[in-house]
Image: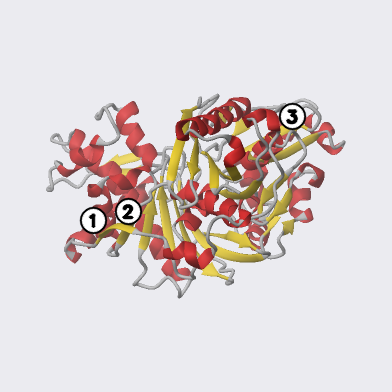
């Protein structure tokens, strides 16, 4: 059998597909952006059919660019934007509503209602999550309540629900398989991460019929076979993981204490805690890092809603840059005597604050503040937020030692200035790998290892290669002053300081 592996990377703003060969080298790729829908303030939606079309198109493009045929592909691995959820008709496969995206805040009132009922501790104990609109469960409940006839149809078994991976698997297999993996399930707010099962009590609280939900499998598992008419040949689907979990796998963070952070639209830092299910006392998330061969590995996670999106705001919102790549160069030219802070709470603040009502703010402006200071503030905000996460992790778990090295990936890590500032603010080394497509690589490894054409865990970990290590080079007093300024700015931004 050929060793080619096709990774489908379905993200928040675009879908990508990458074809890897048996030596884990990129042979071909395709990428396609799709429409972001904002029907109301704080609401974000995607058209599931547009996502589906983009996935099929990019998979074909990856094969074409590599000059390969689907018959040469040993397996498909899928990674996806987490928490974004779809409900579709079991008979036709047609969605009953646009997908509600992880960034969407429309269920904040429901989350507040559940908190007032004293239910957050119950949800957190069972799922490792907090009652926040970020997660999938309240989004499913909203659609069942708001789409005419949806709840009755769901109770009759006519509707299915799932995160994007489930929707894609259903479509790819022609409706034969309704499944998800443990990582995506762990982000729904209705999956018990200790028992590894959907939780009937939490489903009842949110009014979600269990029969709507997919079967939960290991990350490397059998997820069915694609329909022949899609790509010309049938292909096995053998790996699935949520994007941040796939990135941790792609970064070979297999040992407890290893940490990765992905800087895309948002920023998501995962710290491998092994078999230790750490219950955070600092409002981090406890999540499933991955599940292989029936064995669950846990992680502490810090979720930052706005990272690369702050650079997009510089480009598209206030138009101080023409291209995202210009942000680091512009930031480097900022006046060092000005301390301008951007708290990018455009859609609320994530960990460790979890303030859905907070909104973005800028502090420290002077008459001389300009584009360079705005650019530096936007990039520094990512470093400051990451430091907040690392501090919380160190408080929660002894394995997060002062010697922790951060492995990074995502679009923002191409900027040397940003990575150096990240190391300076963290006061810790930041490692950038030679392969930056770690999310797709993680999904590909799950499928490739399952297919028997890629190396197992230890051999794969040894293949990880460093491109550059950024070491902290900032005076401690300067770092301390900057952190104090940041924390003051955050306190003034919180909806309930």
In the rendered structure, the answer to whether residue 390 lies left or right of residue 106 reads left
> In this figure, which residue is indicated by the disc labeled 2?
384
> In this figure, which residue is indicated by the disc labeled 1?
482
Q: CA gap, disc 2 to disc 3? A: 43 Å
Confirm whether residue 253 shows in the render.
no
Q: Residue drawn at (60%, 34%), measured in percent from left and top?
A: 100
* Closer-to-camera residue (106/260): 260
Q: Classify mark 3: helix, strand or loop.
A: loop
* Closer-to-camera residue (405/267): 405
Q: Residue drawn at (39%, 73%), measured in percent from left and top?
A: 401
Decide: is 194 above or below 189. below
- Res 320 label: none
Q: CA gap, disc 3 to disc 1? A: 52 Å
Image coordinates for residue 229, horizontal then vertical, percent: 68, 28
Image coordinates for residue 439, horizontal then vertical, percent: 48, 48
CB contact under 8 Å: marks 1 and 2: yes
> In this figure, which residue is indicated by the disc labeled 3?
93
* Closer-to-camera residue (53/315): 53
Q: Which mark is first along the chain, 1 or 3?
A: 3
Q: Which mark is first along the chain, 2 or 1?
A: 2
Residue extending furthest toward the right = 156
- Label 3 neighbourhood size at 10 Å, few (<14), some (14-19), many (20+)? some
Confirm whether residue 337 shows in the render.
yes
- Label 2 neighbourhood size at 10 Å, few (<14), some (14-19), many (20+)? many
Q: Residue drawn at (36%, 61%), measured in percent from left and top?
A: 406
- Label 1 neighbourhood size at 10 Å, few (<14), some (14-19), many (20+)? some
In the rendered structure, the answer to whether residue 483 lies left or right of residue 277 reads left
């Amino acid at each position: 059998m050929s060793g080619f592996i096709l990774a489908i990377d379905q993200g928040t703003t675009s879908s990508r597909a990458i074809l890897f060969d048996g030596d884990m080298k990129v042979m071909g790729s395709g990428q396609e952006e799709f429409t972001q829908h904002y029907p109301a303030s704080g609401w974000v939606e995607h058209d599931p059919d547009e996502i589906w079309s983009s996935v099929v198109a990019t998979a074909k493009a990856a094969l074409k660019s590599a000059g390969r045929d689907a018959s040469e592909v040993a397996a498909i691995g899928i990674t996806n934007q987490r928490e974004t959820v779809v409900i579709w008709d079991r008979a036709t496969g047609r969605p009953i509503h646009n997908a509600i995206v992880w960034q969407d805040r429309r269920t904040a009132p429901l989350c507040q209602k559940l908190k007032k009922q004293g239910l957050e501790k119950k949800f957190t104990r069972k799922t490792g999550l907090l009652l926040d609109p970020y997660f999938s469960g309240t989004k499913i409940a909203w659609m069942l309540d708001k789409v005419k006839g949806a709840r009755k149809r769901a109770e009759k078994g006519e509707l299915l629900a799932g995160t994007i991976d489930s929707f894609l698997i259903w479509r790819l297999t022609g409706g034969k398989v309704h499944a998800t993996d443990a990582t995506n399930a762990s982000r729904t707010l209705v999956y018990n991460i200790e028992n590894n099962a959907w939780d009937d009590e939490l489903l009842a609280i949110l009014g979600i019929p269990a029969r709507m939900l997919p079967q939960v499998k290991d990350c490397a598992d059998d997820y069915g076979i694609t329909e022949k008419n899609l790509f010309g040949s049938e292909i096995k689907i053998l790996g699935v993981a949520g994007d941040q979990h796939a990135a941790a796998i792609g970064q070979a963070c297999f040992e407890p204490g290893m940490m990765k952070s992905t800087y895309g639209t948002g920023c998501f830092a995962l710290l491998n805690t092994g078999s230790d299910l750490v219950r955070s006392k600092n409002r981090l998330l406890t999540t499933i890092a991955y599940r292989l061969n029936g064995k669950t590995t846990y992680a502490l996670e810090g979720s930052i809603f706005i990272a690369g999106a702050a650079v997009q705001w510089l480009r598209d919102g206030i138009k101080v840059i023409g291209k995202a790549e210009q942000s680091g160069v512009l930031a480097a030219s900022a006046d060092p005597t000005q301390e301008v802070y951007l708290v990018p709470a455009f859609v609320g603040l994530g960990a460790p604050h979890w303030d859905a009502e907070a909104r973005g703010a800028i502090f420290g402006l002077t008459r001389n503040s300009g584009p360079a200071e705005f650019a530096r503030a936007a990039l520094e905000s990512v470093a400051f937020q990451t430091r907040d996460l690392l501090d919380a992790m160190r408080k929660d778990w002894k394995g997060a030692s002062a010697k922790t090295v951060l492995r990074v990936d995502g679009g923002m890590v191409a900027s040397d200035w940003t990575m150096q500032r990240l190391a300076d603010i963290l006061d810790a080394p930041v490692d950038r790998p030679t392969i930056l497509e770690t999310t797709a690589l993680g999904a590909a490894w799950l499928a490739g290892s399952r297919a028997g054409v890629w190396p197992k865990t230890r051999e794969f970990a040894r293949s990880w290669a460093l491109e550059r290590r950024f070491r902290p080079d900032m005076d401690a007093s300067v770092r301390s002053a900057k952190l104090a300024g940041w924390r003051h700015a955050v306190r003034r931004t919180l909806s309930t300081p």
